[in-house]
Amino acid sequence: MEPPPAVQTVSLVKIYRGDGVATTALNEVDLKVARGEFVAIVGPSGSGKSTLLNLIGALDKPTSGRVLIDGTDITNLDASQLAALRNRKIGFVFQSFNLIQRLTALENVEVPLALQGVVANERRKRAYAMLQQVGLELRWNHKPSALSGGEQQRVAVARALVTDPSIILGDEPTGNLDSKNTQAITQLLRDLNERTRKTVVVITHNLEVANEADRILFVRDGRIEGEEITGLGRGLDRDRDPPPNRKNVTQNPRSGPVLGKGEQVPS
């Protein structure tokens, strides 16, 4: 029996209501992400990609439809169950880093372990090992204000990985970085995907980042308009874990060559 997808959405709808106005952010989105797959979601501002990531990451609830993580329907879980799921299965990397300014790099990486009740000595050991993996072991005692943007994002990646989640979600993880650090963080995520077979889903405006994914989804007006298989698939065993819906691949709605070096999806 085949394992379920790492992430699946079924007829997903999200409607925001305010001041008597209803705004549909997502409209009947069906999505499958295979275990070990690296997927990039691209689209203009307001397309619904951030809303989709928030729902996949159990940070928000849909108006209707379902979200399944490793085959488990999380739609009806209560707040404490969702918090436990996030801490156990999902690691987040945000555009703004979201580090605690008064804590050192090591202490920031320890935070998710503290929430799990891991004892102090074990927390420090595991956090330091994770900083080693991202090349920041010599900066363990520096606070965020003493780190560059690229270094802060590496700390954020280490924090996302320290609990050994099966899924990594990135919300514009390179959005605040220069081109050199964008390349470094993208390669770090790619290498982690290949080495550990963790599922990686990132939203991005940067098609250089999207180029490193196994599959690119194009979102507009709350719908997935198309997708493109990049042919990389280095995080997948292609015989066992082909990307879902390969036979249904549609041309990118932008048409023509879509992955020009350094090209940005319009905001």
Image: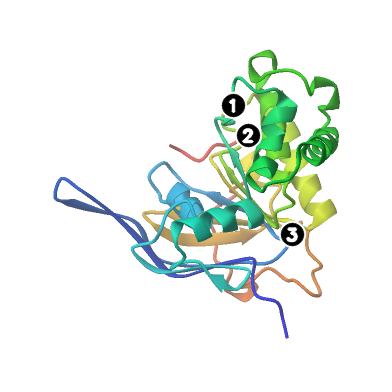
Determine if residue 253 is in view: no
Residue named by callout 1: 100
Residue type at the position of mark 2: Gly
Q: Earlier in the sequence, mark 1 or mark 2?
A: 1
Q: Quadrant of residue 153?
A: top right
Question: Label 3: few (<14), some or many (≥20) within 10 Å?
Answer: few
What residue do we see at 46% from left, 61% from top?
225
Q: Earlier in the sequence, mark 3 or mark 2?
A: 3
Question: Where is 189 relative to 6, above or below?
Answer: above
CA distance for labels 3 and 2: 19 Å
**Mark in the foreground, 3 or 1:** 1
| Screen quadrant of the C terminus | top left
Tell whether label 2 touches label 3 (CB within 8 Å): no
Residue named by callout 3: 231
Position of 147 with respect to 125 (left or right) is: left
Question: Where is 53 relative to 242, above or below?
Answer: above
The chosen color scheme is: rainbow
Asked which secondary structure carries label 3, the reply is loop
CA distance for labels 3 and 1: 38 Å
Tell whether label 2 touches label 1 (CB within 8 Å): no
Asked which secondary structure carries label 1, the reply is loop
**Mark in the foreground, 1 or 2:** 1
| Screen quadrant of the N terminus | bottom right
Residue named by callout 2: 262
Residue type at the position of mark 3: Gly
In the image, 188 versus 165, the foreground residue is 165
Q: Which mark is residue 83?
A: none
